[in-house]
C-alpha cells in the first residue's frame, strides 16, 4: 500500500474484473455518501448472443455511447483506428467522455475506466486526464497491464505518477481488493474534506 496518493490505479490482465471492481466501489461510495459528486465513465463489453461485438462508454449517470465495434461499416468508419478486430469510434467516445472529465470545483472524485489503447487514440483524452490529476481531485482509474513488458506511453506516465497507488488484480485477490480500494478512497475523500 502506497502513501496518501490521490490516484488509485487498478490494473490486471484483460477480463480479470477491473471494471466490475470500479463499478462496485462507485456503487458502495454512492450508497454510503449520496452527496458525493462523482464524475467519469467506465467501459463495458457489448455482447450479441455470447459473442463480444464491441465496447461502449457508460457515464456514471447511465448515458452510453459506442466506443468500438466489430460490425460498424460506414464511409466514416473506414478511417477509424483499429485495435485487434475492433474499430474505435473516437468521436463517439469523446462526445461522452470528455465532458465528464471537465474539472469543476465541487467534484469529489473522478472515475476513469480505462486509460487504454482504444481511449488513447483520442488526442484530447490524455490531456484531459492530466488536467484531472493536476486538479488534485481524487481519481479512481484502470489501466491495462503492459503487453510483452511494454507500456503505452500515456499509461506509463500514469503508472509512474507520484500520486499513483497501484492495485494489481488477479482472480484470487479481486474480492478483497474491492474493499481495499473502497477503504482507501474513503480515507482520501475524508482528507480532502478536512483540507477544504
Image: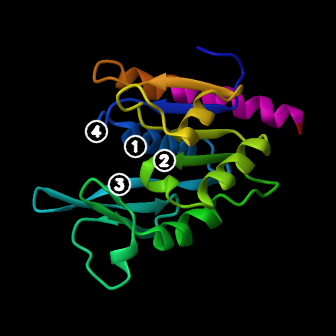
Q: What SS does tag 3 mark?
A: strand
Which callout, 3 or 1, points at the residue further toward the start of the chain? 1
Dots 3, 1 in contact, CB < 8 A: yes
Q: Nearer the viewer, residue 166 or 122?
A: 122
* Residue range highlighted in magenta: 181-195
Residue at the disc numbered 1: 19
Prevailing secondary structure of the magenta residues:
helix
For marks 2 and 4, the one nearer the N-term is 4
Q: CA distance from mark 2 to mark 3?
A: 9 Å
Can residue 108 be seen here? The reply is no
Quarter of the picture containing the N terminus is top right
Q: Is mark 2 in CB contact (under 8 Å) with mark 3?
A: no
SS assignment at label 4 = loop
Q: Which mark is residue 15?
A: 4
148 or 114: nearer the eye?
148
Q: Position of residue 42 (x, y in %)?
A: 46, 53
Q: Is residue 19 magenta?
A: no
What whole-number distance in Å separates the C-alpha atoms at marks 3 and 1?
Answer: 7 Å
Query: Upstream in the sequence, badge 3 or badge 4?
Result: 4
Q: Is residue 122 left or right of residue 12?
A: right
Element assignment for label 1: helix
Q: CA distance from mark 3 to mark 4?
A: 11 Å
Q: Position of residue 79 (x, y in %)?
A: 39, 74
Q: Is residue 179 above or below residue 55?
A: above
Image quarter of residue 101: bottom right
Residue under pointer 2:
113
Q: Label 2, label 4: how many angstroms apart (C-alpha)?
A: 13 Å
Amino acid at each position: 500500500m502506497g502513501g496518501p496518493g490521490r490516484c488509485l490505479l487498478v490494473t490486471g490482465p484483460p477480463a480479470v474484473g477491473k471494471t466490475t471492481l470500479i463499478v462496485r466501489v462507485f456503487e458502495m461510495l454512492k450508497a454510503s455518501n449520496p452527496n458525493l459528486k462523482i464524475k467519469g465513465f467506465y467501459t463495458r463489453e457489448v455482447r450479441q448472443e455470447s459473442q463480444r461485438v464491441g465496447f461502449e462508454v457508460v457515464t456514471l449517470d447511465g448515458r452510453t455511447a459506442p466506443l468500438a465495434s466489430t460490425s460498424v461499416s460506414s464511409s466514416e468508419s473506414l478511417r477509424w483506428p483499429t485495435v485487434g478486430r475492433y474499430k474505435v469510434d473516437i468521436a463517439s467516445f469523446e462526445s461522452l467522455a470528455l465532458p465528464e472529465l471537465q474539472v469543476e470545483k465541487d467534484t469529489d472524485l473522478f472515475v476513469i475506466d480505462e486509460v487504454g489503447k482504444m481511449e488513447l487514440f483520442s488526442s484530447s483524452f490524455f490531456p484531459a486526464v492530466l488536467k484531472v490529476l493536476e486538479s488534485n481531485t481524487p481519481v479512481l482509474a484502470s489501466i491495462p497491464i503492459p503487453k510483452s513488458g511494454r507500456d503505452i506511453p500515456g499509461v506509463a506516465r500514469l503508472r509512474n505518477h507520484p500520486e499513483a497507488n497501484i492495485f494489481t488484480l488477479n482472480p484470487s485477490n479481486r474480492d478483497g481488493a474491492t474493499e481495499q480500494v473502497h477503504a482507501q478512497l474513503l480515507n482520501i475523500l475524508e482528507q480532502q474534506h478536512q483540507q477544504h
